[in-house]
Structures are given as structure tokens and as C-alpha cells.
């Protein structure tokens, strides 16, 4: 029997309203494995879930945690026993904020021995999101110019590095205090607080850009669209601008969908779309898993080779998950806040 310590989101609460529970996990069923958490993280998804605003989140209470890196400690029937004591990454959507959790063995992606858990954790969802938006959605190529909003964030900092490695020029928005770090990643920084933000970007790319990666949404989405040259692509993957808006959580997202869809019918050769990490998971799970494993493995190889440097904002023990969530929501950090396993005494 495995005993798990779990962080529970009981409802719409402040970060300090998270609960800690301890329970015995059932034995893994056919096709399942027990993962001992080595690292998990705080993403925008958990921040939205805390407010009850994340699309398709489960009813309260539940254990958050979108992705996890851990070591297999037990397997159920039909699972290769050789998986035990090996490290894997998995995308869970919920459940990752726990010392131990049960996962489907088919969802496990091997982590190279040369990549430590916190480093791997920063590029699970963030790395796959960045990789798929670049190569599967926007289809950018060497010599292109792109704009990354929030170049100091988890997805943004990964996007910048992947793009620069591929020979792509990057203009990245961030607060002034992060400009040196964004510049070191390889992007040209622009202050997102500048009232003339989009004019500054146009001065850097007077002929327009090939792609804009926008997680902000809101009124600025129109400006992102206008930055594109003919044939360019706008990839929207969130609505941070409406995160704290009262009312129906889905209304801003539905408005986004409608606007993006209509723009594709304009006679200017530009494209717009919403990137959904979970697209296809429900209806084509095998294809979803294969694509995820392929893309995450590619990103992890770049980490192992030293091409991609994971941006770890902080490492915080599981018991202090409330502090981790508060820090991530402060929008003061560069990279991803990582929750790590408790150190055994």
C-alpha cells in the first residue's frame, strides 16, 4: 500500500486556502503505474483553476497539477515490470500536486538520465506547447521573425530558445526588469507596459512578422493580428487579460474563438487559431499520446544536449504549494515555479 500526501483545491479560494490530505492509494489497476513525484509545477492552468475559470476543469474539490516528473515505484497487471525505478514525465491535467499518484502507463514518456527532474518538469507542458505551436500550428521556419508575448514566462522563455535554435528572429515582450534575461535567451526585449508597445514592435519589424504567440487575449489580440505580414499566423493560447473578470469563465474564450475564426476568412492571406494542448485527447487518445511522446522527447533531447536551458524560477517543497502558487501568480518571476518532493530526513 502506498500512502500519498496530496494538495487539494477545495473551491475558489486564495492560495493559502489549499488543503493537505494524506490517503492510501489503491493498488494500480491493469495498465496503470504508481509514480513517486520528483517534480511538478505551477502553470497558468492551475491559476485559472483556482478561480474556477479553466475550461473543462473537474468539480471542486480536486488535486491540481497539470504535469509531473517522477519515478515508477509500482506497476499494475499488463505493465512491464522493467519500468520500476525509472524516471518518466506525464501530463495529467490534474493530480500532479501529490507525493505519489496513479497514472496510465501509456501516458509515461521517458526522461533522459542526464536531465534532472526540475529541469525536465519545466519543459513538459511548456515545452510541448512551445514546440507544437511553432512547428505544428504556426509552421515557422529559419529566417522568419516572430513575436512572443510574455517572453519571460514558462512557455515564452521556451519558445524564445526553440526559435533562436531554429534560426528565427524573436521579439519578446516582458517587464523591464526581465529585459537582460530575455536578451540572454536570444530575443529582442520590448516593455509590455509601454503604451506604444505595438508601435515599438512595428519599428523593429516594419514589414510585419511571420507569427505572433499571444497568451494574453483581450483587447490586445487585434493588435497582435495587425502585426502579421501576409501569410503570417496568429497563435492564441490563453486569455490572461480576462483572468480576473467576473462572470461566466467561458464567455471570453468563446469570444476569442469567434474572432479568430472570422479572421481566417479575410482576404489577406493571414491565419489565426487557438492552440489547445488537449485537442484530440478525448476523441483520438492514441494519436494524442503518440504526438505528445514524439514532441516531448524532442524537447528533452534538446535539454540533454544543452541547447535548451530550462528556466526554473524557484524550487518549492510540496508542503509549501500555497507559497508556490502565490509566487507564480505574482508575475514577478522568470521561468516556471517548480514544486519538488519533500527531502527525507
Image (cartoon, rainbow, N blue to C red):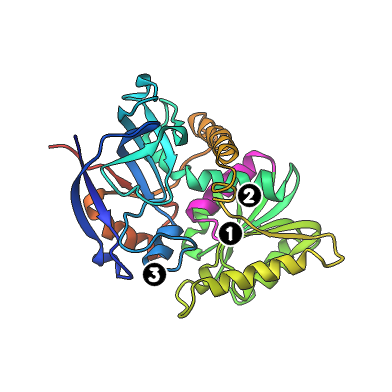
Q: Position of residue 305 (x, y in %)?
A: 52, 29
- Quadrant for residue 253, please give it: bottom right
Question: In terms of depth relative to the viewer, which is nearer, 101 or 317?
Answer: 101
Query: Is residue 304 in sight in this rendering?
Result: yes
115 w.r.t. 208: above or below: above
Q: Position of residue 219 (x, y in %)?
A: 62, 76
SS assignment at label 3: loop
Q: What is the CA distance from the residue labelled 1 to the residue labelled 3?
A: 18 Å
- Quadrant for residue 291, please give it: top right
Question: In terms of depth relative to the viewer, which is nearer, 269 or 274?
Answer: 274
Query: Is residue 223 in sight in this rendering?
Result: no
Task: Verify CB contact (< 8 Å) between mark 2 and mark 1.
Answer: yes
SS assignment at label 1: loop
Quadrant (top left, top right, bottom left, bottom right) of the N terminus: top left
Residue at which label 2 appears: 133
Task: Mark 1 or mark 3: name the one nearer the start of the chain.
Answer: 3
Task: Mark 2 or mark 3: name the one nearer the start of the chain.
Answer: 3
Segment colored magenta: 150-167
Task: Verify CB contact (< 8 Å) between mark 2 and mark 3.
Answer: no
Residue at which label 3 appears: 51
On the picture, is 156 further left or further right than 82?
Answer: right
Question: In terms of depth relative to the viewer, which is nearer, 63 or 310?
Answer: 63
Q: Residues within 10 Å of mark 1 (few under 14, many from 20)?
A: some
On the picture, is 11 further left or further right than 300?
Answer: left
Task: Mark 2 or mark 1: name the one nearer the start of the chain.
Answer: 2
Q: Among all residues in the image, which is located at the extreme top?
A: 82
Residue at which label 1 appears: 237
Disc tally is 3
Say which of marks 2 and 3 sits in front: 3
Q: Residues within 10 Å of mark 3 (few under 14, many from 20)?
A: some
Q: Position of residue 337 (x, y in %)?
A: 37, 52
Amino acid at each position: 500500500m502506498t500512502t500519498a500526501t496530496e494538495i487539494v483545491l477545495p473551491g475558489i479560494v486564495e492560495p493559502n486556502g489549499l488543503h493537505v490530505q494524506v490517503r492510501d492509494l489503491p493498488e494500480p489497476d491493469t495498465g496503470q503505474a504508481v509514480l513517486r513525484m520528483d517534480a511538478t509545477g505551477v502553470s497558468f492552468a492551475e491559476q485559472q483553476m483556482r478561480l474556477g475559470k479553466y475550461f473543462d476543469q473537474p468539480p471542486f474539490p480536486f488535486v491540481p497539477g497539470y504535469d509531473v516528473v517522477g519515478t515508477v515505484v509500482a506497476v499494475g497487471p499488463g505493465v512491464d515490470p522493467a519500468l520500476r525505478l525509472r524516471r518518466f514525465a506525464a501530463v495529467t491535467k490534474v493530480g500532479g500536486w501529490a507525493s505519489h499518484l496513479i497514472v496510465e502507463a501509456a501516458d509515461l514518456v521517458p526522461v533522459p538520465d542526464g536531465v534532472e527532474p526540475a529541469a525536465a518538469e519545466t519543459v513538459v507542458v511548456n515545452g510541448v506547447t512551445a514546440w507544437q505551436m511553432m512547428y505544428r500550428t504556426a509552421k515557422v521556419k529559419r529566417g522568419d521573425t516572430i513575436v512572443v508575448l510574455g517572453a519571460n514566462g514558462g512557455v515564452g522563455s521556451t519558445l524564445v530558445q526553440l526559435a533562436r535554435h531554429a534560426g528565427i528572429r524573436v521579439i519578446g515582450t516582458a517587464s523591464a526588469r526581465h529585459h537582460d534575461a530575455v536578451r540572454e535567451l536570444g530575443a529582442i526585449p520590448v516593455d509590455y507596459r509601454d503604451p506604444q508597445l505595438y508601435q515599438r514592435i512595428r519599428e523593429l519589424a516594419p514589414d510585419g512578422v511571420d507569427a505572433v504567440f499571444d497568451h494574453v487575449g483581450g483587447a490586445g489580440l487585434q493588435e497582435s493580428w495587425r502585426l502579421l505580414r501576409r501569410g503570417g499566423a496568429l497563435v492564441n493560447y490563453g486569455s490572461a487579460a480576462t483572468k480576473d473578470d467576473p462572470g461566466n469563465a467561458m464567455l471570453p474564450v468563446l469570444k476569442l474563438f469567434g474572432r479568430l475564426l472570422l479572421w481566417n476568412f479575410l482576404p489577406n492571406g493571414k491565419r489565426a487559431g487557438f492552440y489547445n494542448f488537449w485537442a484530440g485527447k478525448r476523441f483520438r487518445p492514441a494519436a494524442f499520446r503518440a504526438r505528445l511522446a514524439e514532441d516531448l522527447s524532442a524537447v528533452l533531447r534538446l535539454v540533454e544536449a544543452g541547447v535548451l536551458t530550462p528556466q526554473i524560477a524557484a524550487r518549492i517543497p510540496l508542503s509549501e504549494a500555497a507559497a508556490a502558487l502565490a509566487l507564480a501568480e505574482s508575475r514577478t518571476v522568470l521561468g516556471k515555479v517548480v514544486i519538488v518532493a519533500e527531502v527525507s530526513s
